[in-house]
Image (cartoon, rainbow, N blue to C red):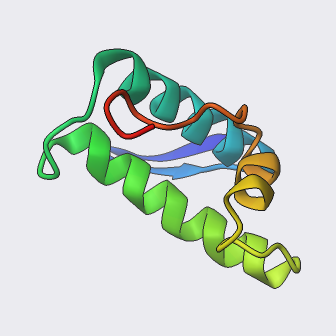
Amino acid sequence: MNFHGKEGDYLLGMSLEEMKVTYCALWNDLKRRGALGIDEVPSDLLHDLQTVLQKEAIRLGVDVGLHSAWAEFVGLDSSCSLPGNE
């Protein structure tokens, strides 16, 4: 992982595995606290990571439309539904 920038504006470089770990950590925090509002900053970061990871998964031949394949790719357990959405 590497950081570039200054004065509050940073660029974060992450490997695919680091992105997966970060995505899972954010997802598990979201799950623990319940659904966030769509406009909250953590959900933006989660959404952006998910978008990048899904593109990479598709490039690698993962069927992201199949929930179990997506969960396996990013490293989520099978109970990744948010409370109230199971």
Task: Report x, y in % for residue 3.
Answer: 54, 43
Looking at this view, is 16 or 53 the one in front?
53
Q: Is residue 77 visible?
A: yes
Residue lying at 71% horizontally and 67% vertically, measured from the top left: 66
Task: Please name the residue shown 67% across and 49% down the image.
Answer: 14
Quadrant where the C terminus is found in the figure:
top left
Q: Quadrant of the N terminus?
A: top right
On the question of residue 7 being in view, the answer is: no
* In this view, 81 is above or below 69: above
Residue at the extreme top: 32
* 77 displayed left or right of 39: right
Viewer-proximal residue among 46 and 15: 46
Residue 32, given in percent of the width and then of the height, sits at 40, 16
Instruction: Check the image and report above or below for 22 versus 69.
Output: above
Residue nearest the observer in this picture, 42 or 69: 69
| Residue occupying image coordinates x 57% and y 35% | 80
Please report the residue visible at 64 percent of the width from the left and 43 percent of the height from the top: 2
Query: Is 4 placed left or right of 33 in the picture?
Result: right
